[in-house]
Amino acid sequence: MKPNRIVIIVPPGLEDLAMEECQELGLSKIEKHPGWLVTYGHDRWVHRLNNLARLPSRVLIELTSFKANSFSEFEAKLNKAKLGAIFQDRSIALKISVKHCRLYHTGAIEERILRFLGRPGSVKGDESCMSLFVRGEDDVFTLSLDSTGDHLHRRGLALHRGVAPLRENLAAALVREASPSGAVWDPTCGSGTLILETILRDTRWPLNRFRKFAFEQWPTHQASRYQTDLEEMEKEVKPLKRKILASDLEEKELDGCRANLERAGCLDQVEVFQEDVTKLNPEDHLKEGVILANPPYGERIAGGDEVLRSLAGWGEIAPALGVHMVLPRGLKLAGFQRGIRFKNGGLGVGTYHHHGS
């Protein structure tokens, strides 16, 4: 059976880290493009990428790709692709984007696709609906089936969200870039996003423990094959061994963090405590390890500048601690190097790091 062409959507700026992650999962042939990666594989890889890859946004399976300069040509090539059997009796949610195409009217494109597939459009609340992504660029149209469903940053773990949280796959990027090998502490933990992403990377828990994926509802889904793949993934799970600390000034935030850690089943493995970053010596809690933080900054949260100044000074106060933070682009912090750049909630941000001795 011919392998699928798999398109892995990733936040722009994280392509290199995502490729590294996919290689660690066992993929060898990967093409890199701005905002997405391409590989080839059977259902096993669709299952593994959705469950184990922490940086992607979603995983698509390409169904067909063709060039069309007119609607008559578009209809003829769509008809030739014979995609109807894939969807069977399911409704279809279409997500269409076009760039530099003669056929730019997305409504007309949607009408023709639904008519040729003989399927109705999506209805709100229809969980069996299948999502089809249509991308048109320079008159080439690519139709891909979404295997993920809810965005992959929605792990199904965090029932509580703090103030101005970092998206989970962006938090995973900071964890991967920092590559902590010893103790980890997030002193502005909020609801615990960075802590949970550290745990997910360490343990390699498949996300099936906490959420479902779109491919599980497909008419062609082989539940027994998926169960076998899940059993393989569970064999790869590792115990959590490192020392992990989570602290915050706000007790309400810590309550949310504790609840999320409890859902993950590892509350007893994380030291959670209330502390004001601006009034502590970091070595009182951790003498050696890595600080991971998404601190308040600018107008996002009151008092952010003072918190940032305190964290920025930790690299000098505690030289055995590496400090890795997500902050707005363009900041100049003495002793810190800039890392990857991406967007969080539309704001241009990047990573800043000060390595311990």
Image: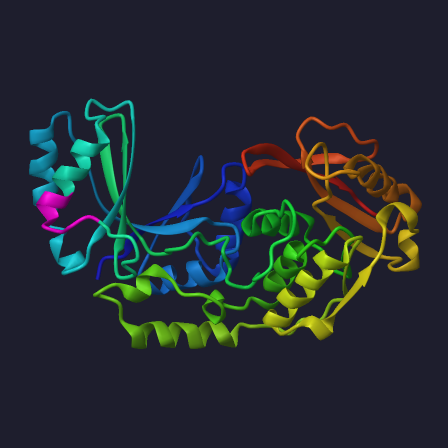
Hey, which quadrant is residue 329 in on the image? top right
Q: Is residue 117 magenta?
A: yes
In the drawing, does residue 309 fall left or right of residue 55?
right
In percent of the image, x 73 and y 43: which residue is there?
295
Which corner quadrant holds the N terminus? bottom left
Residue 154 spot, x, y in % from top left: 49, 56
Occupied quadrant, residue 201: bottom right
Residue 187: in magenta span:
no
Height in image: 29 above or below 113? below
* Total count of labels: 0
Q: Is residue 357 visible?
A: no
Please determine whether, in this image, residue 354 is positioned above or below residue 250.
Answer: above
Q: Nearer the viewer, residue 120 or 201?
A: 120
Q: Residue at x 43, y 59 (%)?
A: 50
Q: How is the image coloured?
A: rainbow
Q: Left or right: 160 with respect to 325?
A: left
Residue at 67% across, 32% down: 328
* Residue 147, percent from left and from top: 33, 56
Residue closer to the observer: 297 or 244 = 297
In this rendering, does residue 137 appear at all? yes
| Residue 156 x, y percent position in the rendering | 50, 63
The x, y position of residue 119, in whole percent, is 13, 51
The relative height of residue 319 versus residue 336 in the rendered view (above or below) is below
Where does the magenta region start and end?
A: 114-121
